[in-house]
Amino acid sequence: MVGLMVSFRPMARVSLTSSAQTRSLDTIPTPVRFGFGRPVTATELTRLDIDVQPDGKGLPAGAGTAVQGKVIFAVKCAACHGTGGTGGLGGALVTTSMTTTAVVGKRPDKTIGTYWPYATTVFDYIRRAMPFNEPGSLTDEEVYHLTAYLLHANGIIDEKATITAQTLPKVVMPAQKLFIPDDRRGGPEIR
Amino acid sequence: MKKINRRTWLSGATTAAVAIAQTATGKAVQVGVPIEQFWSDDPTKQPGTPPSQVGTRSPFEKLVKSPSEISSRTPLQDLHGILTPSDLHFERHHNGVPAIDPAKHELLIHGMVDKPLVFTLADLKRFPSVSRIAFLECSGNFRTGKETLSPQDICGLTSQSEWTGVSLATLFREVGVKPGARWFLAEGGDAALMTRSIPVQKGWDDAIIAYAQNGEALRPEQGYPVRLFLPGWEGNTSIKWLRRLELGDAPWQTREETSKYTEAVGDGKIRQFSFDIDARSIITFPAYPAPVQRGWIEIRGLAWSGRGTIERVEVSADAGKSWQVATLQQPVLDKAHTRFRLLWHWNGDETEIMSRAIDSTGYVQPTFRQLLDARGGNSGYHMNPITAWQIKRDGRVLHRPETR
């Protein structure tokens, strides 16, 4: 049986079988590196590495204002998020009395003002996933404008504020202080 | 003997509903054939269908997931054993199932590593492989509020498969993860470019870069051609259509780990990075909508824990007044759906049946009320309460909606 196997697979891996006849070969150490894969090119990294971190790492060049973002929002976002981001099929983004009033059987919408702990997430998410029907179609400049608009509409930044790679990470979100890490640990306690 | 269309019989039809008929040009086309035409009164009096390329279910079996706009649920009440047929594995995606050519799909690992590398699917398959049977559950897997809910409706966002791929630890060694790396970002290649931050330790512990499910390539809706699989952790973290891993020293705070997949836990606090799935069980028979008859009934169900193995399942057939230990069907695996059963004689009186799981950490599946008390309300995610079924005198089985 072992001979048969070897004749079909003469190259390697016999050492990984568990039969008694070949167990002695299990002493072949697993290499630290197999040498598979290839180096990444700079072009690939630029195309793929689009994430933005809370400290601002990954934010591109550009600047945005609420005034310009308002115009883009009306054209590209309001269909799903409602006029001014106050609610629609895609949920409310802006805190209003509608989102803070408890309705029986319906959880209040989690808006950027009440539930988003980091402003950089707004930029990252719009850039990677919005608009829903045309993801990835916005320019970095448009994303900055929309980010500024949504932060202003939630009362977090001034209408005149300019959002850039330097200013966005400094925006303190109202919800940030609410977030705590997982406190469940298994065992008998219910948390 | 019932007449059967000769061309249908000759075709080697793989199902009764779809058969191959020859057109005038000899070109095979698929046509629908009604089951009644195909079915025989006495299968011993006529030859059966010849061998087929791909097997299918009996046309008598109507197994379907229940799709909504964002997810599709496994019909738990219709399944046996612990493995979910791949085509019935629940689906949850955030902007559809992408169409990916495996020849063009690559996985990039970069960031805090010695040697950033790009792996093709063929590269990934060259590494030593690992396989593991484990459940995958969405942390938003809970519905209640009415009596006419089936196990599929209540918690059909959990399924189980054998996952095969390369251990992420192997790839971490290949790229040389730097000692300071504490988290990694996993990113999907779907229209949502789904991202989650995962502690590096999970990558070293038991994460799998999976390319196969139940013996074949992943299904497209399960991340074809390659996904992350994190045993025991909330489903959203097992990023599908995986295209990139970036090592870093802090979490990215992506939308899916801040404004979604976080839960209110009282005093206005919001719990984040709640990765582990706590122990849960559900009786899948008897359950709505199938009625039962008085006499002997084998109560059957599933139990699982993201923190270890199922130690014990207790079943009550008297609305929680007394509990009996159910039999656990082997194998009882770590972080896996475990089948339990208990023989019960129903005398026809109205009652409620329910199950509770106890895992290897000593955690006891809570009641809905216990969860609400602990979290100051319904937290939305990670709701794993005991599910109760009402047995009516006429044999109807109805969900008993949880109340405060």
Image: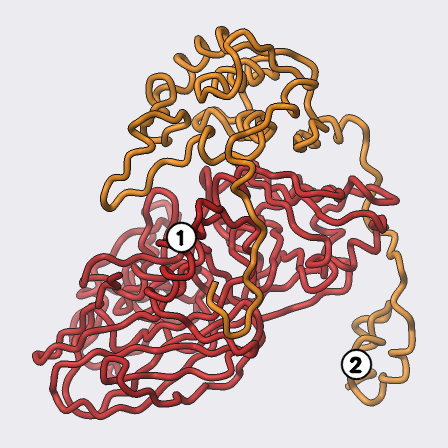
The x and y percentages for residue A62 are 66, 12
- Label 1: chain letter: B
- Comparing marks 2 and 1, which lies closer to the viewer? 1
Tags 2 and 1 both on a single chain = no
Disc 1 marks which residue? B379
Location of the N terminus of chain B (image quadrant): bottom left
Q: Which one is in front, B47 or B317?
A: B317
Image colour for chain B is: red
Q: Which one is in front, A78 or B276?
A: B276
Q: Which one is in front, B16 or B381?
A: B381
Q: Residue A4: which disc?
A: 2
Q: Residue at x 33, y 31 (%)?
A: A99
What's the residue type where badge 1 is placed?
Ser
Circle 2 crowding by C-alpha within 10 Å: few under 14, some 14–19, many from 20: few
What's the residue type where badge 2 is placed?
Leu
Does residue A80 appear in the picture of this structure? no
Up the image or down, A181 lies above or below A52; here it is: below
Q: Which one is in front, B296 or B359?
A: B359
Q: Residue B172: which disc?
A: none
SS state under label 1: loop
Does residue B62 appear in the picture of this structure? yes
What is the distance, in whole Å, between disc 2 and disc 1 at their CAs? 59 Å
The x and y percentages for residue B104 are 66, 39
Location of the C terminus of chain B (image quadrant): bottom left
